[in-house]
């Protein structure tokens, strides 16, 4: 007989495995058995946690979700760029994919000759050819999908991408 899956935080949900069994009225599905506020079916709040244990962080919270990553703008650390993981390595409140250096790296579409380290006219020409297209993921114009939306209308190279491109136009992006 398997040992009991203990509900460590007393919220009625346990972290279940195949090597333990449920006790009494407990349910499976807890993803943080040290926090009684985190368990399935609890309302998601804007706190950087997966409150309802569905594998998503801060999804469905207040505000317009302009980038389609299931995070409302009030919680999204990068509301114009698709970033469901909300990664923020330097802890400055701006998502890694929205840091100017990251946008600059994605906007530097032509890395030949004098253009190698700058977002300049050559990059603008590449971007302009891709503007208005809805390429398949991995296609050459997909490089201009600077808001990183992988599906739906947002995957098209549109005004959201243009605004991101212009935010780093004529900027040096590392290199020599």
Image: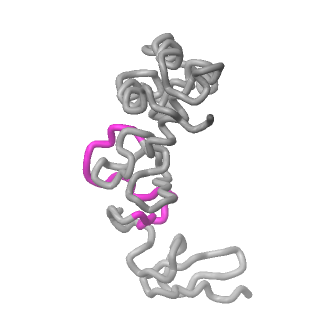
Span shown in magenta: 48-68
Q: Please give the name of the residue rendered at 33% of the width and 38% of the height, measured from the top-left corner.
A: 66
- Say whether residue 1 is left or right of residue 31: right
Q: Nearer the viewer, residue 136 or 175?
A: 175
The image quarter in which residue 50 lies: bottom left
Query: Residue 42, image x and y in percent?
Result: 36, 68
Rendered view: 148 above or below 21? above
Q: How is the image coloured?
A: one colour
The extreme front residue here reads 176
Q: Nearer the viewer, residue 157 or 35?
A: 157
The extreme left residue here reads 63
Rendered view: 115 above or below 28? above
Query: Residue 34, image x and y in percent?
Result: 49, 83
Query: Residue 77, image x and y in percent?
Result: 38, 52
The image quarter in which residue 6 lies: bottom right
Q: Quadrant of the N terminus?
A: bottom right
30 drawn magenta: no
Q: Nearer the viewer, residue 138 or 43?
A: 138
Query: Residue 176, image x and y in percent?
Result: 62, 34
Rendered view: 71 above or below 14? above
49 drawn magenta: yes
Q: Nearer the viewer, residue 87 or 47?
A: 87
Q: Please give the name of the residue rendered at 62% of the width and 24% of the height, measured from the top-left corner.
A: 111
């Amino acid at each position: 007989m398997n040992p009991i899956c203990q509900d460590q935080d007393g919220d009625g949900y346990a972290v279940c495995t195949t090597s333990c069994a449920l006790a009494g009225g407990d349910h499976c599905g807890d993803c943080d058995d040290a926090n009684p506020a985190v368990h399935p079916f609890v309302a998601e709040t804007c706190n950087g946690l997966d409150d309802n244990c569905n594998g998503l962080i801060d999804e469905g919270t207040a505000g317009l979700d302009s980038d389609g990553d299931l995070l409302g703008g009030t919680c999204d650390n990068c509301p114009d760029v698709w970033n469901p993981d909300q990664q923020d390595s330097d802890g400055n409140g701006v998502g890694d994919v929205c840091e100017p250096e990251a946008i600059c790296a994605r906007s530097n579409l032509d890395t030949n000759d004098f253009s190698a380290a700058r977002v300049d006219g050559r990059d603008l020409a590449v971007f302009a050819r891709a503007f208005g297209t809805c390429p398949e993921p991995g296609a050459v114009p997909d490089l201009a999908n600077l808001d990183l939306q992988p599906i739906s209308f947002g995957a098209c190279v549109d005004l959201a991408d243009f605004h991101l491109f212009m935010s780093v136009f004529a900027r040096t992006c590392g290199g020599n």
